[in-house]
Amino acid sequence: MDLGFLANHRDGIILGLDLFGTAIFAITGALRGWRSRLDFLGVVVLACAVGVGGGITRDALIGATPVAAFQDGRYFIICALVGAISFYVAPRLGDRWNVIPVLDAVGLGVFTAIGCEKAVHYDCTWVAVILCGVMTAVGGGVIRDVLAMRIPAVLRSDFYATAALIGGFLFVALERWMGAVDYFGRFLIVSAAVLLIRLIAMRFKFRLPEAHAVPARQRWHLKYPHLRLPKE
């Protein structure tokens, strides 16, 4: 790999990956809208919500206004085009949509790194830097699921938001204790780390512990420990 090329074109590379991640996230939003039987406008709206929703929320919270998506029209144009195309091609692709989670993992890493970097640029605390990375990566998906009247997948799914959270901690470590690593180096390292964590989690089906309902008999025992219940 030509490292000189990467160094000379780092801003363009970051922008290209940012737009790529926006397009992939928009596809996941459009697919959710299609599966929820929304009309054409609904599918496009969900595509835009996932593609730019996390970044808009982040920018609004840290005071980066006008938000980036409103300053560069390419983001909304890409989301709208992806949503419109997905509306018509989704029924014909069938199982080929299985590649989307892999590409989505790329977008997850890219958005985590970009969110953290922007928070650093606005002199946020290290906690806010981590949260901005996670918010940028998963905020659009949360908005998508709320609009589709579903429990947000990041609250009940496998290592998704967790991967972004780990990436946020890694970014802070690099930024605070490894000053020799510039912003492009942090971007590449964090993006690759989040991507790797997400792919490993998908491959081995890692999940966080889930809450389970307590059976009625056990609830009674917890409330009245000295009460003897009849055997079933």
Image (tube, rainbow, N blue to C red):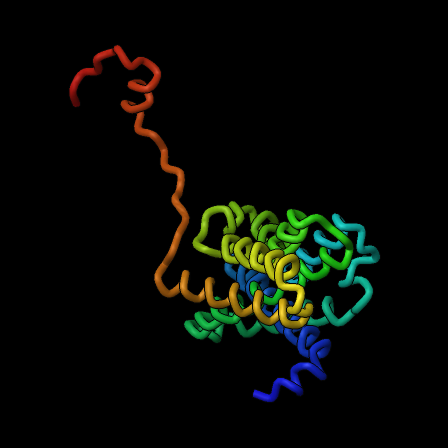
Q: Is residue 14 above or below residue 210?
A: below
In the rendered view, does 202 fall on the left or right side of 148? left
Q: Look at 68% across and 81% down and name the residue there.
A: 7
Q: Position of residue 96 (x, y in %)?
A: 44, 75
Q: Look at 83% across and 55% down and name the residue there.
A: 65
Q: Look at 74% across and 48% down and name the residue there.
A: 61
Total marks drawn?
A: 0
Q: Is residue 117 above or below residue 218?
A: below
Q: Position of residue 94 (x, y in %)?
A: 44, 72
Q: Is residue 30 visible in the rendered structure shown here?
A: yes
Q: Is residue 39 visible in the rendered structure shown here?
A: no
In the rendered view, does 150 fall on the left or right side of 43? left
Location of the N terminus (image quadrant): bottom right
Q: Position of residue 93 (x, y in %)?
A: 47, 75
Most extreme residue toward the left is 231
Where, by quadrant of the figure, is residue 39 drawn?
Answer: bottom right
